[in-house]
Image (cartoon, grey):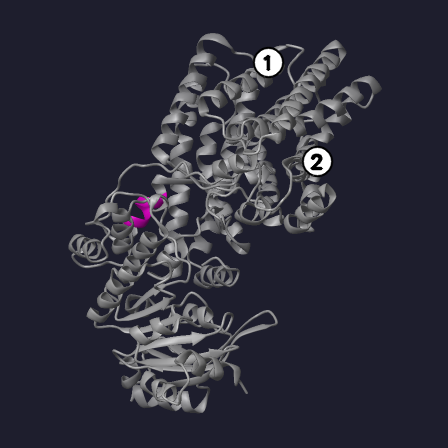
Amino acid sequence: MFLKLLTLLIRTRFSRSYLIIITLVFVYSILAIWMGLASSLFIPKYYLGFIFLIFLVPSTYMGGMSINEADRDFLFTSAIRNRDLIPTFYLAQALASSLIFLSATFVYLLLLIGNPLYLVSGIISVICMALLPISMSLNMAGKSPMIKIPVCIIETLWILSSFFGYGFGPISFLNGGTASLLSMQVILAVTVSTTAFAFISINAESLPFRFYSFSSRNSNNFSRSQTFTGIGRNKAILKLNFMQVDFTSRVSSVGNIRVSVNRVSVYRLFFVMCIFAAAYFAVSFFYIREDGFQLFIATSYISWFLIMAMSSGTLSKERAWLSLSAMSIESYMRLLMISKILQALFVSLPFAVVSALLDFSGILSFSVPILFLFVVPSFAGINFIITLLRKPYQVLQEDILPSIYNSSQFMTVPISLFMLFFIFLVMIFPITFLFIIPAALIIILASMYNKPYWQNSIYRWVEMGYV
Amino acid sequence: MQYFLKVFILIMINKGMEFTKAEFPFQAQMPLSFRNVSKSYGKNVAVKGLNIEIKNGEKVALLGENGAGKSTTLKIISGLMRPDAGYVRIYGQLPSSLSAKQHIGYLPEDPSPYLNLSVRENLEYIGAIRQTRNLETRVDDLIYHLQLKNYEKQKPLSLSRGNKQKLCLALSIIHEPSFCVMDEPLNYLDIPTQEIIFQYFESMNSSFIISTHILSIARRLTERIIIISSGTKIWDGKLAELEEMERTGKSMENVVSELMKNVP
């Protein structure tokens, strides 16, 4: 039964392109190292820490497994025992997200290749890091936020501890020495115990339904009430699309478990960014002026804005029939792109201001964040254009965990590679800013007024089932 | 002079050639001219040489089995899809043109409103995009007539499927369209609500093309029926003609079913 189910899941969920994507991610990770990061163990440590963080914490907070309506209606109502059903889902999930994680991170083990003992501990650690998010998500299915939030905080502190010289942190294996073995033992113990707990809970009859009930909950939609009376068409579109940030498909771009539409108010996001920026300023100004801290902030900052810029390609399904049948396609798309660019610009502001203040105060801060004020929105626009060449990221079943793994989910990977390249270029050679931004603006403006481009894109989406 | 020139070009070159302006005065009065339209998805032919003309104020039902090409036809009419071949005009204009879109009220088969906006916000937003006059009054009117008053501050996710469908219907007609293009508009609606919708549609002075596979809905809402199968028109006539055939002792369902089976 287990093998039959596994075959079914693989057949119905994984496309051939998925393997190609894994290869691409592997190439991406090699290039990330190659782009000046492999010279020491320092950067990989932060990079790996960040990747692990974005796999583990969202998995823990979201909980559950990739289960869709068909699973609920036909698989869960079949006479299959949980002990057959859930391990199959676990394995399918491991194929979905762990392989991506492994392909993205295994390259770091090259750094340990000189010492077989460290290498083995590194391999075990990375495999544990790939599996732990799945076990945690299984354990946290249906749990209240009061339990999940403290667990997420503990996980974050655990990961961060690697950067402060503690040997038991999950990334400390890269340090070599006794820390490498201690780190491996800790993560192995944590993964084994978490997985054991997860498999004990498999016998609970309600578990599959807890997965589903959680996965089908309402989106975290922002609830600011708005009025659109008395304003013109363009202002209405800009107002809605500027204020609403669609957090869709982003986690899927790194192979994580959940894709749902979480619409967040841009003001709320701005407020959160202000808090982070203020905290960064306070810590840099009063406490830590070390390169390590600045580099950690820089990595997180770049990664965050990479996600922010790439999110511009996210459009929710429900807009198409209403907006596109109400006005000219090119005007709507133009306004949508402008609002996405403005959104990226607005959210970039707090860190840019704080970094400028730190620079003026003569305190070390990470490079050229003000330039990012232009780079990030420009790439938000370009990403919007590029993603529409194929299809915008789309959630076919609103608020359902996606269970199909195909190439379009991972479109962000090659695009992010290009973006990373240009961002590093601007960081290392600020003068390139003078060429990159005008080039980006020319591309954006040329596309903006390219009527056939938008029309053809929309017609293609409609044929692909977008409306 | 310009008129004769256009007629000449149309005759001499190709009847499928596209003009952005209305070609003929009589066409400008017609909600829909749909001639020799074909559309394929790869190797699958969805619509094949289909012809439909709808006159002002006419209410037409598009019947057909699953996969007959009904939804594709409506998407082409609403300007969301481009045909591979053929000639489509809405009041003499290209379906993708702004003036055609101002006339059309389109409702797809499985519509979804903006999930993060409340019922009222949805109506206000689309009303603003549609540049609806007296928007506030129009929103109040729709909320009242479609009995959405108790839900106006709720988000669509908390609505029942039927109420969500009512909201989508309201969104598609907020600008008081003169030509309604609707794909299964009464899906998910209970019988009393269907009655409300029937009455509301009857009160509208608009032309309709409604896709359905439920004969009773076609009977109630429209006066002319077009049956399509495999993307081709197999029957086009007045409802009364079908009713005439029904008198031969067969039910209307049987009559329609036989028509669908007898595809050449």
Q: Give the main secondary structure of the magenta stretch.
A: helix
Quarter of the rendering containing residue A178: top right
Q: Which mark is residue A103?
A: 2
Quarter of the rendering containing residue A303: top right
Q: Residues within 10 Å of mark 2 (few under 14, many from 20)?
A: some
Q: What residue is shown at x 51% (from left), y 63% (from top)? A: A463
Establish if B98 lies above or below B24.
above
* Position in image of residue A402 (x %, y %): 55, 44
Q: Where's the C terminus of chain B, which quadrant?
A: bottom right
Q: Amino acid at mark 2?
A: Ser
Q: Is residue A258 left or right of residue A7?
A: left
Query: In the rendered image, which residue does mark 1 sit on?
Result: A161
Residue extent of the magenta highlight: A236-241
Whether residue A296 is visible here, answered yes or no, is yes
* Position in image of residue A242 (x %, y %): 35, 42
Q: Amino acid at mark 1?
A: Ser
